[in-house]
Image (spheres, rainbow, N blue to C red):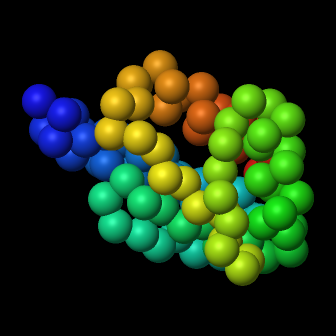
Amino acid sequence: GTFTQSGQFQVIIGNTVSDFYNDFTEVSGISGIGLMIGISLKSKKAGDVAKAALENGLLVLTAKEKVRLLPPLTITYEEIDEGINILAEIMK
């Protein structure tokens, strides 16, 4: 069901975002629970990242210096990949 799928997505998104911490010097930390994830930034402004994401078709939120990911429970694997790829391009 949806909750089982949500748990699988939590692992996929969590692992991928953790890779951001290792691969991108811009990321200073990762926090969150379940599918709600916060990405702390070193020098980029969260608002600028959110604007760039929106310009590329990805809606993210901000909370002070964090970029917040809050995907719907109905998200697909393809949508996760697409969103992560958009974020990766912005974080380079």
- Is residue 67 toward the left or the right of residue 35 in the image? right
The one nearer the camera, 24 or 89, is 89
Q: What residue is rendered at 85% in x and 35% in y?
A: 55
Residue 44 seen in render: yes
- Is residue 22 toward the left or the right of residue 48 in the image? left
How many numbered markers are drawn?
0
Q: Position of residue 12 (x, y in %)?
A: 36, 41
Q: Please identify the quarter of the rendering in which residue 64 is found.
A: bottom right
Q: What residue is rendered at 54% in x and 54% in y?
A: 69
Q: Position of residue 49 (x, y in %)?
A: 81, 55
Q: Is residue 48 above or below residue 3?
A: below
Quadrant of the image containing the N terminus:
top left
Outermost residue, top direction?
78
Q: Please identify the quarter of the rendering in which residue 3 is found.
A: top left
Residue 21 seen in render: no
- Is residue 57 toward the left or the right of residue 52 in the image? left
Q: Position of residue 5 (x, y in %)?
A: 21, 34
Q: Please identify the quarter of the rendering in which residue 85 is found.
A: top right
Q: What residue is rendered at 59% in x and 61% in y?
A: 68
- Is residue 71 toward the left or the right of residue 64 in the image? left
Q: Is residue 32 above or below residue 80?
A: below
